[in-house]
Image: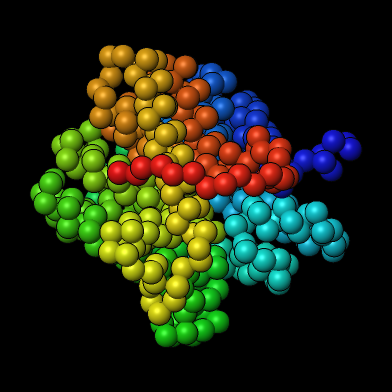
Amino acid sequence: MKWLKHLTPPRLIALGFAAMILLGSGLLMLPASIQEGVQVRYIDALYTSASAVCVTGLIAIDPGDTFTPLGQTILALLIQVGGLGVTAVGAGVILALGKRINLKGRHVLREGMNLSSGGGLMRFVRDIFIVTLLFEGTGALMSYIVFARDYPPMRALGISLFHSVAAFNNSGFDILGNMQSLIPYRSSVALNLITCWLIFWGGIGFLVIREMWEKKFRWKKFSLHARVVLSVSLALTAAGTALLMLTEHLPFMDAFFHSVSARTAGFSTVPLGSFSSAGLLVMIVLMFIGASPGSTGGGIKTSTFFVMLLGIRSAATNQGEKAFRYSLPREAFRKAATITLMAIGAAVVFTWLMTLAEPDLPFMDLLFEVVSAMGTVGLSTGISPDLSDAAKGLSIALMYIGRLGPMTIATLWYFSSGDHVRYPDGDIAIG
């Protein structure tokens, strides 16, 4: 197929994710994937596949009550591919076969993993698979100790593996059944902490994990990116915990868990339908910011949020954009502002469309659903299964946009090679 050779990297990445979603929906519709006596409509299979590949976790049908062990395995694989990225998985398969990746493939891989350079690319891909195997294996082992108390050994093993994959890839799927997420384990401090541990490491990004290991966890040797990611992640977790305790009067563990989970993971130990508007607004802000670049999570990213704050402070105080004894690149604020405004625009437009598709549902629930889908979070106030087909279609589109990122979506229609004419600067009043 010669036309593939002429596609830009963003278009190849977008096409790869779309193809995986369609393939996943077909596999989930197989009779062997669906439990006997259960009927699954294609729109629900497509919705589930999109949610898995985009590592979201929103569900229209419960995976535990709907799919067989084969179907649940397919779902876990879709989550794994979506979390690592179609390009990284493809590169891993090529390397496993002992073949080389050409320059075009390396460029696509660099774009897909949000890397600034192509140096050491193949080694980085290998590190990603090693890190993933290490964390998911450890998470499954620790989770098994909890689930083995309530389920037979083989069932507990399956739940543990699925949960570890879903948590590390920041996808809020579970196979416990009854649309209950982790509510039955609200009082299990062990599972709460294990899940938060997996979510945190999956959400800070493979670049930061590798840097922390190579520099032996010495803060003074960390790069600006690593310092920003870790600082903002911890600050948002702390702020989210405090605000949820204040607005919802939740115990510390519940507030802490939801503060971590809202940053694109999508697990819940408390029914969100019982939250006040103030609590939902806190969750919406956390979902909108999301995880970090190069991670398994979505949102505008922690570094984008940090650069926006720093740029605003710089404009207000007339000081340079500096942090942690580093100066930020000149284009950083412009790119961060573009991403943030595009994300806000998408949230506004899709919320408006959702209100047209579902006029009888509360506005706050619809806004929450939109931001959850766009941030690839997977949390819901409980309206997901009852959405109309049109609303589910909008949610699928949002999850797709959120997984690719607004900048990638924008560059799909970018045809110009740059400006060839320069005009004189004009005057314009701001503020």
| Left or right, residue 206 beside residue 171 | right
- In the rendered image, residue 175, in percent from the top left (x then y), is placed at 44, 41
Q: Residue at x 16, y 37 (%)?
A: 276
The quadrant the C terminus occupies is: top left
Q: Is residue 152 visible?
A: no
Residue closest to the eye, 89 or 344 = 344
**Nearest to the observer: residue 156 or residue 58:** 58
Q: How is the image coloured?
A: rainbow
Q: x, y (%) of residue 55?
A: 50, 45
Q: Residue at x 52, y 47 (%)?
A: 425
Q: Position of residue 46 (x, y in %)?
A: 56, 27
- In the picture, measured across the screen, residue 305 lies left or right of residue 405, that is left
Quadrant the N terminus occupies: top right
Tell me the residue at 45%/57% (across/down).
333
| Above or below 21: residue 261 | below
Q: Residue visible at 39% across and 67% down?
A: 321
Q: Is residue 237 left or right of residue 370?
A: left
Any part of residue 210 in sight: yes
Q: Is residue 97 left or right of residue 423?
A: right
Q: Which is nearer the eye, 377 or 341? A: 341
Q: Quadrant of residue 404?
A: top right
Total count of labels: 0
Q: Locate residue 428, reporting x and y percent.
A: 41, 42
**329 up-or-down from 68: above or below:** below
